[in-house]
Amino acid sequence: MMIILPAVFSAIWYLAAKKEKDVIEGLVMTQLVYHTCLLVITNLWSIPGLLNTWTVFFSWLAILVVVLFLLLRNAKCEKRRALDGENEKQKTAVIKGWIHDARRFLNETGVCGKLMLAMIGILLLVLLFGAVFTVPYNYDSMTYHLGRIAHWIDNGSVNHYVTNIDRQIYSPVLSEYEMLHMWLLAGNDLFLNFLQYTSMIFTGVILYKTAAKLGTDPKFSMLAAFLFYTMPLTVSQSITTQNDLLGAMWFAVFLYYLVDFVKLSQITFDKEQRKKLLCVGASVAFAFLTKTSVCASMLFFMPWLVLVCLKRKDRFIKLLESAALAGVTLVALISETLIRTCLSCGHLMADTTSSNIMVATKNVKYIVVNILKNFSLLITQHLLRPLNGVIYRFAIGVGTILQVDFNNEAISYHGFDFLHHMNMGEDMYSHDKTPSAVVAYLALLAGVVMIVAVLAALGGKRRKAEHSDSTTDGRQDAAERKTTEPWYEHLSIGFIVSSWLSLGFIMALLRWQPWGSRLMYPALAMMVITIANAAGAVFAGRRKDWKSGSGCMILIALAALFCIRPVIYNLQPAIENAQAGCKDRQKRYFRFNDRYTAYKQLIAKTEELGFKKIGLSISGDGYDYPLWLMYRETDRDVRLYHVILDEDRRNGEELGETLPDLAPSGKTGRKTDSSLLPECILYVEHGRLNEGECLTYQGTAYRCIYVSDVNPDAPDAVLVKE
């Protein structure tokens, strides 16, 4: 049944590519249409609580039938036009156009382009192995990415439910919606890594096209994609069930259309522009639903567009209409999340959404130091370790000069010590904290190039074209003009400034934390366009010159060299799983958690007692998903759902927290029917609880009758109703 998803996507892509007469344009449109359908299906069937395998399958099947009908109708129209003597070659024009574009690409990019294409192909094949054989094991997935999917499956709805892990209901939902459909149609989590993997592929393609739209040299546009694919954080994320690559993809889609509006001669609000405005609004909405912080990074590209509109003297009424259309699209698509959050906590955004990740100060000195600390996370690498120390010491030195407490909680998550968490260990390239030194350093260099270009322009160093009067009509051959223009004329100053504002803001906003590189990743990933544009400008007019090719080759070699170690490190779980014959899958969820045996003991105890309705009180950092999955594979009749103990509720109220009071069905209500009370409660990953001790849920006492002996410091326990 899982095959229905790629079938629908491919059909929409083919239809869109034929209509737009461009493969990449069709791809971008397909992503937007596909995820809109995903959003509608998920919310439509959640209303009656009927979100399950069959409703999802037949919904996608209906969409596939509609798309195939449209393709068939278009084919008949083309045949009719051919019989009438119109557009006789229309049938094969699209495919021939694609082939022509591919050949032109290979010719324009030369040896560098062919080399990068080959290396990307090899890398994608290697990472495909990782996506297939890596069992999800990262902390975020075990606690809330996949944990929430488990409860949605049980509830038949994505409506909010009672949970001890608030990130399961307040974190962005889009990547989990897609994985939910994959889980329901496949009946397991074998294919869930493919969301990040395919997002990686699509993002690279979109980045290449966006760089080309800016006027970047073809081989350096290809370099943008190559740098993205070889970023260590791209590699580590591509075989996980997290959401960073999907968030980066929506950022890339946003920039793809933003550049179109910058390049327009005028905002006219015509049919074509309205379509693209819908796409802009949808891309921001999907970014919000995937990783909210991406929207903050997007925001800093808007001043560039506004300045361009002012320079073009666009009509204010057209700008207002454009903003309204994009805004309405945005609000319409994110409304499902806003409504659910408002119903649960009384606000459009939950208080816990930020999770204390934003800086807690407006002091400029502290923010400057926070930026340096965050940038130091990005430039860490394993080949030239002394260079890491130079950057760290520089950041610390600036903090000393500014008299800033380097580990102050306002700029340090939970007061973590900066030197103790420098990410220099063997796990440097783990998916939670992987740096991307090559792109970070090259982005810094691109910023320097931009400053030099601005100074050159302001200083009147523009070179006059040698053949400006070579033709009577004032026209000049494009290639000739390219060689006579000053190098900085090929630089997109607006994009480079915007990209640095975007990254700089996110580095200033996010409180330093050891795994902060992931939070800055989407903004950093967009820097590959900046790097490509700057490199292309520096080598402007030298497409066939050895200097241009050599410069590109050096960057290719540098990116490839720093990509090897992350690939080797992150493939280890997949290699181990493949060598073991894909056995003991359950154990592999606990790669960084030693509770597998304890969970087995809890399941054995409740199975021995014959309990089917089991409440779960688990810590906010608990491995929820593996426990649910182990119960599901042991006995499909067992119903496992979260409960908030009366003691926890009182503690929360004392701390000023608002805890949801939801029944297992997801419906609100202060009073719980006795039939909804669990037969027993699992007390997992909390403090110590001894046999005989009692806790209460909804006024009913539950006594501890069993304690697992695996984790003596925080043993897991089983409590039964008195």
Image (cartoon, rainbow, N blue to C red):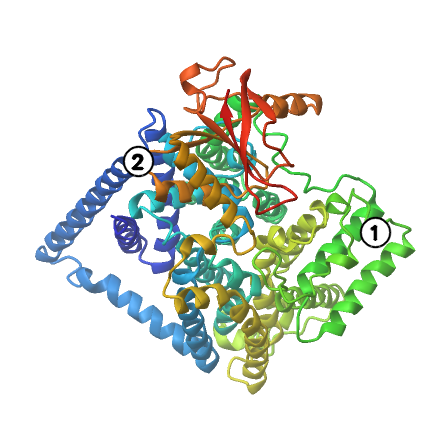
User: Residues under labels 1 and 2: Cα distance?
Assistant: 50 Å
Tell me the amino acid under the disc marked 1.
Phe
Dot 1 surroundings within 10 Å: few (below 14), some, or many (20 or more)?
A: many
Name the spot of residue 451 as percent of width and height, x first: 73, 64
As drawn, 615 above or below 653: below
x 45%, y 79%: residue: 115
x 59%, y 84%: residue: 547
Name the spot of residue 134 as percent of width and height, x first: 44, 60
- Pick the residue in front: 338 or 589: 589
Mark linked to residue 406: 1
> On the picture, is 655 further left or further right than 121?
right
- Pick the residue in front: 56 or 53: 53
Q: Nearer the viewer, mark 1 or mark 2?
A: 2
Which residue occupies the extreme left position in the image?
Answer: 83
Mark linked to residue 638: none
Residue linked to disc 2? 52
Name the spot of residue 606 as percent of width and height, x first: 43, 35
Q: Are marks 1 and 2 in contact (CB under 8 Å)?
A: no
Tell me the amino acid under the disc marked 2.
Asn
Choose top left, top right, bottom left or bottom right for residue 107: bottom left
- Pick the residue in front: 562 or 514: 514
Q: Does residue 281 appear anywhere in the picture?
A: no
As drawn, 66 above or below 492: above
As drawn, 122 above or below 165: below
Of label 1 and label 2, which has the lower sequence position? 2
Q: Does residue 522 appear anywhere in the picture?
A: yes
Choose top left, top right, bottom left or bottom right for residue 422: bottom right
Which secondary structure lies at badge 2? loop
> On the picture, is 388 further left or further right than 280?
right
Which secondary structure lies at badge 1? loop
